């Protein structure tokens, strides 16, 4: 665990076994691109993995897997801009793996968005060289990055040689499980010299044909002898710098990155060379970068005084580096693993469900852009539905460049070494996540324009998909959705079945009913001209709406033993010997892999990877969930919900970081005494790498953002609804004091602070209308420039 004073995240010493994890957690980014916190003097090997990823920059490659030709789309590892190696006199290049490191310290400064590294090497002749490095990925100019290195000879004078490079030899090999797949995404790599101190590298992605240009300008205050030494696909600039005992010399490397996905450029290489030549000096870039971060922190203020505070701040830092205000100008979705590594290939899943509700109340324009990413791919989702014999929009479980289904066809079980068919693309519930986010975003921002245009178009097609795929079963007198996979990805088929998919997944059906009901509400509220346009555009007819109404009220939700069944027949599955497996394997998070390696299958058991039915308690407040069930003709009383929570809690292995988050959230209301264990696990997920080595392959963005939202919406019960802010705080003793600021319907910096059973709301002065705050027993109106303190009812 790192030392962590409030605003810094620090690692002492060099530990090769921890390096990948630290690289992920020390990644710096600005929403446009990010670079892992790798040591600049090291190249990719079994310890180090320098990776740079630009949001939305994907490429497809075909690989031969177990005799099948499979195509995968990956977020491309771009040429490495970090390389800066050095040696003393004629010694060998210094590296933590070959030379003695006298000390090594890393310090991620969250307030300033910088990563500092201080270290001291001993060379072959026993001479000491102190090195201090500071790097940033610029938050104002998203195309710029900077690496300052200071060298100090200790006890000797002579010369050091420094090589500052741009490395185009990189491949996508950051994830062990994908190693046997094709990984070379960059072609036509060329290196060259622009001016005395500037080298460049250009290349393109092999199939998506994105052209990439990088330029690096390296300057030193010392009198150095310099030359270029390009080697094929690596641009290099060499500096011979005289050093004097105790005197520090500085080398600044400024890098610019452009791709043909950028607006307003004609040629990425020229743009990069031009940008780097005009870039201000180190001090000016650092100042503007720090100011941008200060503004970000003000807009996303979160104050949690206890030990959770620094972790939440780190989570917020990584969320803001992946999805920054720059994201608002990009055509990108929410990459499940940030821009921090190659796990899940940079794909976009339903994880935005855990991210947008947080962003909506801070950076609504970023949420809007992320939803627009989905809207741009609505046509593709409609084609996917048509191709599968359905109507409406069938959004892909994994989305990348163009909204095609990118879920891998085969996945490797590293335990058994077997490649297995992957049916997770049957998680059509992703469509409901998109619809939920459209609704949430519009409620929080009041963006009627989006709701009435792109939002309504997506809602209509997602609702249409659900109504179309639901088939009436006369025996049950209900509609059934068959052949799907729910959020718990363990269950993909009935035991012994010859085709994948399960019937009547409760989460899928209840959320589908919600989508249908909300879409009908939105259609009713549309201004008449817009309603006509939308009906024409989507060929909607009133008969279809009647069918939606009917389906929304009659979708089947299965029950067994007085609890909601995860899917039809779930109650007939075998019970797993949880204690026996825990005893035998210790960590059973990936129970699916354990059972498969034993020649068994998790499909046979009442065992879930993550919250599935319980996700309903994450998305909907208790009152809303009751009314949803009532609409469907079921009475969901507290006792049934409580039994349901207890049932799944005992049968979930938490094989996803999202699981502990959702359980913590749900238990805070349903079984408070147990909630903290899960909240704590959600907080520790990435910093302690609880999913066994996966954080080194990229952070878990959904869980990180989810923990922020746990404070913001989970514990406060905050719901922007119908133009008012509803609050229903629930006390969690371990997280009983907190404050944060939100942006709400044109009000900036609305402060909410919960402390000693009181809630204080402060609305900054502006010419906006007062904000209506609704608690269970009263509604108050807080005018701009005013504060209000409310005593909370005992719970
Ligand atoms: C989880 C999914 C999630 C995906 C990407 C999987 O392990 O089961 O729910 O969407 O990771 O984060």
Image (tube, rainbow, N blue to C red):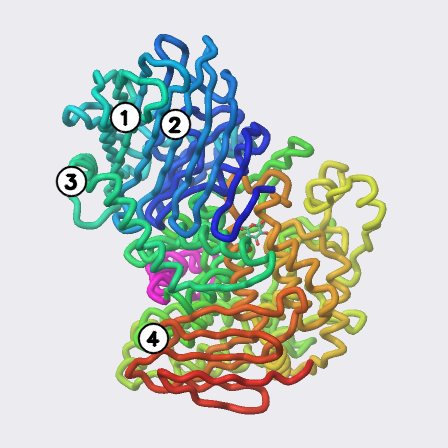
For the N terminus, the quadrant is top right
Q: Marks 3 and 1: which is nearer the front?
A: 3
Find residue 457 and report its horizontal and vertical position in percent.
36, 70
User: According to the image, label 4 marks what residue?
Assistant: 447
**Disc 1: which residue:** 189
Q: CA distance from mark 1 to mark 2?
A: 11 Å
In the rendered structure, which disc, 3 or 2, sits on the residue that comes first in sequence?
Answer: 2
Q: CA distance from mark 3 to mark 1?
A: 25 Å
Judged left or right of residue 566, residue 149 is left
First along the sequence among labels 3 and 1: 1
Q: Which mark is residue 521?
A: none
Query: Left or right: 703 with respect to 731?
Result: left
Look at the magenta stretch and give its main secondary structure.
helix
**Residue at screen point 64% across, 81% down:** 626
Q: Which mark is residue 278?
A: 3
Answer few, some or many: residues within 10 Å of disc 2's Cα (few below 14, many 20 plus, some between 14 and 19).
many
On whether ligand 1 comes within 8 Å of the CB at mark 4, the answer is: no
Query: Which region is colored magenta?
Result: 364-392
Residue 252 sits above or below residue 398 on the image: above
For residue 762, side relative to residue 661 (left or right): left
How many angstroms separate mark 3 from mark 4 (CA)? Answer: 38 Å
């Amino acid at each position: 665990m790192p030392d962590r004073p409030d605003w810094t995240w620090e690692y002492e010493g060099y530990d090769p076994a921890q390096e990948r994890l630290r690289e992920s957690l020390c990644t710096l980014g600005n929403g446009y691109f990010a670079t892992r916190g790798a040591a600049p003097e090291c190249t990719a090997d079994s310890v180090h993995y320098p990776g740079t990823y630009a949001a939305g920059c994907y490429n497809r490659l075909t690989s031969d897997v177990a005799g099948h030709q499979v195509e995968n789309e990956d977020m491309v590892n771009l040429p490495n801009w970090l390389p800066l190696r050095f040696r003393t006199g004629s010694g060998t290049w210094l590296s933590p793996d070959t030379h003695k490191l006298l000390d090594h310290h890393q310090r991620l400064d969250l307030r300033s968005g910088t990563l500092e590294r201080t270290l001291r090497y001993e060379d072959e002749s026993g001479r000491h060289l102190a090195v201090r490095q500071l790097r940033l990925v610029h938050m104002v100019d998203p195309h710029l990055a900077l690496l300052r290195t200071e060298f100090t000879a200790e006890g000797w004078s002579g010369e050091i040689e420094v090589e500052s490079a741009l490395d185009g030899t990189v491949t996508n090999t950051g994830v062990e499980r994908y190693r046997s797949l094709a990984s070379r995404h960059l072609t036509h790599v060329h290196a060259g010299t622009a001016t005395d101190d500037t080298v460049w590298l250009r290349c393109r992605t092999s199939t998506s044909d994105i052209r990439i240009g990088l330029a690096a300008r390296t300057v030193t205050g010392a009198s150095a002898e310099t030359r270029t030494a390009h080697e094929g696909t690596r641009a290099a600039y060499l500096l011979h710098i005289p050093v004097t005992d105790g005197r520090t010399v500085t080398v600044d490397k400024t890098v610019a990155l452009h791709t043909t996905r950028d607006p307003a450029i004609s040629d990425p290489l020229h743009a990069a060379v031009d940008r780097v030549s005009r870039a201000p000096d180190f001090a000016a870039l650092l100042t503007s970068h720090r100011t941008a971060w200060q503004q970000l922190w003000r807009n996303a203020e979160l104050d949690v005084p206890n030990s959770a505070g620094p972790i939440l701040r780190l989570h917020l830092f990584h969320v803001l580096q992946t999805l920054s205000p720059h994201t608002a100008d990009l055509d990108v979705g929410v990459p499940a693993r940030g821009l921090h590594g190659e796990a899940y290939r940079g794909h976009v899943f339903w994880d935005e469900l855990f991210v947008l509700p947080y962003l909506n109340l801070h950076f609504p324009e970023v949420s809007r852009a992320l939803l627009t990413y989905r809207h741009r791919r609505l046509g593709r989702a409609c084609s996917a539905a048509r191709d599968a014999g359905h109507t409406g929009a069938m959004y892909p479980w994994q989305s990348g460049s163009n909204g095609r289904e990118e879920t891998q066809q085969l996945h490797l079980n590293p335990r058994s070494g077997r490649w297995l068919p992957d049916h997770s693309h049957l998680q059509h519930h992703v469509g409901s996540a998109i619809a939920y986010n459209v609704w949430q975003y519009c409620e929080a921002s009041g963006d009627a324009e989006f709701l009435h245009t792109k939002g309504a178009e997506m809602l209509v097609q997602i609702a249409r998909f659900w109504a179309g795929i639901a088939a009436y079963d006369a025996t049950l007198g209900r509609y059934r959705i068959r052949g799907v996979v729910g959020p718990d990805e363990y269950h993909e088929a009935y035991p012994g079945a010859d085709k994948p998919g399960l019937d009547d997944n409760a989460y899928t059906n209840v959320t589908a009913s919600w989508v249908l009901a909300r879409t009908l509400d939105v259609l009713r509220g549309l201004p008449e001209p817009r309603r006509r346009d939308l009906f024409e555009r989507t060929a909607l007819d009133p008969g279809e709406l009647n069918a939606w109404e009917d389906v929304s009220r009659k979708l089947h939700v299965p029950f067994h033993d007085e609890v909601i069944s995860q899917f039809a027949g779930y109650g007939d599955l075998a019970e797993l010997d949880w204690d026996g497996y825990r005893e035998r394997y210790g960590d059973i998070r990936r129970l699916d892999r354990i059972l498969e390696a034993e020649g068994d299958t998790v499909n046979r058991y009442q065992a879930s990877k993550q919250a599935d039915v319980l996700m309903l308690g994450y998305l909907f407040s208790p009152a809303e969930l009751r009314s949803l069930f009532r609409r469907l003709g079921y009475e969901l009383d507290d006792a049934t919900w409580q039994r349901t929570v207890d049932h799944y809690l005992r049968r979930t292995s938490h094989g996803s970081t999202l699981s502990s988050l959702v359980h913590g959230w749900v238990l805070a209301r349903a079984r408070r005494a147990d909630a903290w264990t899960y909240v704590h696990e959600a907080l520790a997920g990435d910093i302690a790498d609880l999913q066994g080595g996966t954080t080194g392959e990229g952070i878990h963005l959904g869980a990180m953002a989810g923990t922020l939202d746990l404070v913001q919406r989970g514990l406060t019960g905050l719901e922007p609804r119908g133009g008012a802010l509803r609050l229903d705080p629930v006390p969690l003793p371990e997280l009983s004091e907190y404050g944060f600021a939100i942006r709400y319907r044109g009000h900036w910096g609305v402060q909410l602070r919960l402390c000693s059973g009181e809630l204080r709301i402060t609305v900054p002065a502006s010419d906006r209308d007062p904000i209506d705050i609704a608690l269970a027993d009263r509604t108050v109106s807080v005018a701009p420039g005013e504060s209000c303190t409310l005593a909370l009812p005992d719970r």
